[in-house]
Amino acid sequence: MEKKPIIRVRNMVAKYGENTILQDINADFYPQQVTVILGSSGCGKTTLLKNILRLYQPESGSIEMFGVETMGMEETAFEALLGRMGMLFQNGALLNSLPVYDNIAIPLEQHTCLPPEIIRRIIEVKLNLVNLSHAINMLPSELSGGMRKRAALARAIALDPEILFCDEPSSGLDPLTSAAMDNLILKLKNQLKMSIVIVTHELASIHRIADRIIFLDQGKAVFSGTLQEAMNCNIPAVLTFFEVGKF
Amino acid sequence: MKQENNTLFLDGAVTKVTVPALFAEQKNLDLNSITSIDGKNITELDSAGVAFIDGVLLQAKLTSSALVHLTSDHREQYHTFSSLALDAAPHVQSVPVFQQIGEGVLQWVSSLQDALYLTADIAFWSVVGLFNHKGQRKGAVEQQSLLIGVNAVGIVGLLSLVLGLILALQSAAQLRQFGANIYVADLIAISMVREMGPIITAILLAGRSGSAIASEIASMKVSEEIDALKMMAINPIRYIVVPKFHAITICMPLLVTLSNLVGILGGLIIGITYLDLSPTAFLNEVLNVLVLRDIVISLAKSEIFAWAIVIIGSYFGFHVKGGAEGVGRATTNSVVASIFAIILVDAIFSLVFYF
Ligand SMILES: Nc1ncnc2c1ncn2[C@@H]1O[C@H](COP(=O)(O)OP(=O)(O)O)[C@@H](O)[C@H]1O
Ligand SMILES: [Mg+2]
């Protein structure tokens, strides 16, 4: 815990037009840890990820990644950083016109000079990790929702990123596949020393993988700490979440 | 990376950054003589590095047991990312040419069949829809008429005027030589009413409304909206296509009439300014040469064009394949196919009513 955070967000404000979604967010994401972002649906979790990744420009505040301030950073410098990160989007966001294989090949071809033979092997392995080897030549429109999500995860981890962002990776997956996803995420964290940021609502999954929790409520980060601390804290919104999920 | 006796020593980082160089270097090695790979000095490994090691092992015809002295961390990583245990991905087999041609023909026949079924469906429900408005949104026909008809008035009018001007101007130069100035009226009247008016209007509508119909239906199909309609016991043809069909049936003759009139006006302008004709003489000649039959054929033809546009647009919409990218394809195909159909129908009309 004493390690320096790999992502440090300070006083970030995010808006869509006039509509303020996040105000004054402070959050730390630590290396080699799984940080889970919690919050009711529509409270701005996806918005937080997208603002950290500069897919939207935050209104104000500071975001440090890998110890470097990224607000106001040159586009090209930021692109180099993007090669060290992967993101699994909420709806997969596979390119519909390309088969699964080419979708995963894109980041590899964009960010490395690896020979095609090696790229092919990496793609096969990554697809096997998400248990989707049979779909290698299929088009996204021929996959089910859960399969699309797994293919998207394979694309997100194609480059062995240092930070992996997952937006609701297990929604739409059956419990078995979802557990397998959790195992894969733990494997990535332990073996590849990845730092992982996950948005999820699955309590079982949170107990399996979470090291730290950040809880968003009404545009603010109301809690940030370890899983243990979260379960023993006295913030009503957080407690309700863990209580309701328990039955 | 260096080779000593029969062992290949890897050192430092073996990652996506270093692998391209290692891969080039490896081509100069005699991999067949290698019996083991020593990974003791590897400091960093990732999936690209593992893929590289797998490649070397494969070429040296070794198994993963020939990889020695890895730290336990790296050994775990190797097992996570090794592709040696995977079955080779299935290869896509190419289909022989004759089979492709045969399948293409069969597919064409079956899509023609589908299109005929769809035509029958649309025809049936349009007639039913005249008497029974159930399963249609209120005001849908009016709304569609606005989109298909009213909004097209400007562009149809403008194009027809320009077309009339051009036709008259081109022929005026020839007719003058024979002092047959007045016949420009005959020429414009006949060509606008029998050919140009219907054709130019139909092609414009194919581009404007045919593409809109195809893309609307295709995107509804892709986002499962059509399935949702069916689940609510609403016939998608009745709900989506019939209002458009009625609207275009009403609007097309009006647009064609507009196009004919404005085209003749274009001819009149050239007649007055360039050929020294009096407006009365020109209009008299026009009324003399046009018979009712011409106008009826013109309007009948344009109805067929209009129906072809709706039917083809909805055919490509309903038969969209794939996701969002299929919508674009369906739209393009529908425009090309409707223009083709329009010209084909026009040719048939010309042959049948030649005499
Ligand atoms: N592109 C957008 N434009 C405007 N508002 C948006 C956009 N995306 C999301 N929002 C709004 O921002 C809020 C947070 O959305 P989001 O971050 O997607 O929530 P979630 O926590 O479920 O991921 C919601 O109220 C949503 O209506
Ligand atoms: Mg979201």
Image: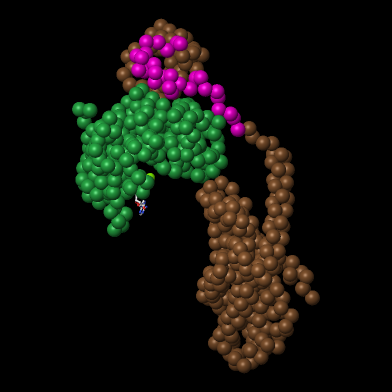
B57 left or right of B274 in image: left
B37 left or right of A26 in image: right
Above or below residue B222? Residue B27 is above
Q: Chain coloured brown: which letter? A: B
B313 left or right of A25 in image: right
Is residue A55 visible in the rendered image? The answer is: no
Q: Residue furthest front?
A: A247
Residue depicted at x 55% and y 50%: B224
Q: Is residue B86 magenta?
A: yes
Q: Position of residue B163 (x, y in %)?
A: 58, 75
Q: Quadrant of residue B216?
A: bottom right
Is residue B8 visible in the rendered image? The answer is: yes
Q: Chain coloured green: which letter? A: A
Q: Depth check: give the residue in front, A53 or A113.
A: A53
Residue depicted at x 38% and y 37%: A245
Q: Is residue B230 magenta?
A: no
Which quarter of the rendered picture does the C terminus of chain B lie within?
Answer: bottom right
Q: Residue furthest right?
A: B355
Residue depicted at x 51% and y 31%: A132
The residue segment tinted magenta is: B65-92
Residue depicted at x 50% and y 41%: A145
Q: Depth check: give the residue in front, B324 or B166.
A: B324
Q: Position of residue B268 (x, y in %)?
A: 59, 85
Q: Quadrant of residue A88?
A: top left
Q: Position of residue A78 (x, y in %)?
A: 29, 41
Which quarter of the rendered picture does the N terminus of chain B lie within?
Answer: top left
Q: Depth check: give the residue in front, A110 or A81.
A: A81
Above or below residue B153? Residue B181 is below
